[in-house]
Image: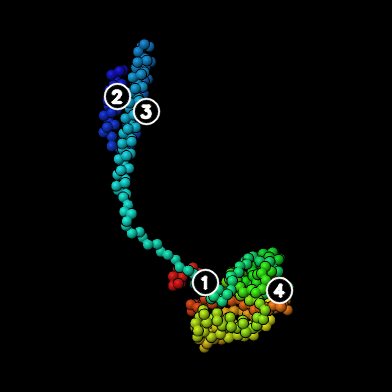
Amino acid sequence: MRQKLEEIRERAAKELEAATDLAAIEELRVKFLGKKGELTAILKQMGGVAPEERPKLGQLANEARGYIEQIIADKNEELQKAALANKLVEEKIDVTAPSKRRKLGSKHPLTIVLDEIKDIFIGMGFDIAQGPEVEWDYYNFEALNIPENHPARDTQDTFYITEKMLLRTQTSPVQIRVMENKKPPIRIIAPGRVYRADTVDATHSPLFHQIEGLVIDKGVTMADLKGTLELFVKSLYGEDSQIRLRPHHFPFTEPSCEIDVACFRCHGAGCPLCKGEGWIEILGAGMVHPKVLENGGVDPNVYSGFAFGMGLERVVMRRFNIDDIRLFYDNDLRFLEQF
């Protein structure tokens, strides 16, 4: 039995030395140390050994097992180190090599023009104000002098969440919130998303963007409104831009008007985009109604003001000669990459 143990040690060392991969080492481990391995088979014969010889043979068997386990561990470590070194050579990375250029996006055309509009009004001394898109009926309608039976409050035009809560149909509620929290003089614009139950076509969308403007101070007149908007249009579209004011009616302004810009497609001759009129409406405006001032906590006997609201999409269409509002929301890269 001693001779067999010595032979197993020698053969294990010789065969492990010749092993070239981790799979071969595992096979040899099973061959010598597994449940049906050679060393295990020797140990099963210990019952036939004289009692006085068993301790010595048991010690020799344990030494043989320890020896084989050790050379297996050493060989494993040797092959793992060699594999890692080979991997490092094969997968060497040249950190000085130029990387692939990442394709960068660009601003959406709505964002481009909104930033320009903000810069124009900030240059005129306006601040930027914000308000919630989910709004109370009071701020969206009542405080703006829109009575309960007004068509603008109809469920066919407004997305109601509850009887008194809705998705705002305009950014005008922001002016009430500003007046409640700030004393005149006030000079703000409030850009943001608004929602109306409109049918989608070339010039209408149920989700679009508005920019509300509000100026309140002592002695503010309609002339200030006209001068402000004329400066805005010429700053955005160029000095040769033409505008016109048309009398109109809004519950929250008195007197009221609409501002049109000459159609960029037909230059006033008339086309399908401008519905044959030669002009495109870009915003509504007027002097703030005294009742609206009162609802905002401002004394109409001391202060006056003007307000305006424009649809950002229509302004951008005029700015970039775009004739279909749906292009802004189609996410077509062929369109967006032009900007």
User: What residue sits right under mark 3 in the picture?
Assistant: 34
- Quadrant position of the N terminus in the picture: top left
Give x and y (percent) for residue 154: 69, 72
User: Which tag, 1 or 4, sits closer to the chain's start?
Assistant: 1
Element class at badge 3: loop
* Residue at position x 73%, y 79% in the image: 301
Q: Nearer the viewer, residue 153 or 227?
A: 227
* Residue at position x 46%, y 70% in the image: 336
Which residue reaches farthest bottom? 269
User: Which tag, 2 or 4, sits closer to the chain's start?
Assistant: 2
Question: Distance of mark 1 from mark 2, alpha carbons?
Answer: 83 Å
- Hey, what amino acid is under mark 2? Ile
Q: Nearer the viewer, mark 1 or mark 2?
A: 1
- Compared to residue 21, the image places residue 166 above or below, namely below
- Hey, what amino acid is under mark 3? Gly
User: Which tag, 3 or 4, sits closer to the chain's start?
Assistant: 3
* Residue at position x 33%, y 35% in the image: 76
User: What residue sits right under mark 1 in the picture?
Assistant: 115
- Hey, what amino acid is under mark 4? Val
Q: Are marks 3 and 4 in contact (CB under 8 Å)?
A: no
- Quadrant position of the C terminus in the picture: bottom left
Q: Nearer the viewer, mark 2 or mark 4?
A: 4
User: What residue sits right under mark 2 in the picture?
Assistant: 8
Q: Nearer the viewer, residue 58 or 190?
A: 190
User: Which tag, 1 or 2, sits closer to the chain's start?
Assistant: 2
Say few, some or many: other residues with alpha carbon within 10 Å of mark 4 (under 14 / 14 to 19 / 20 or more). many
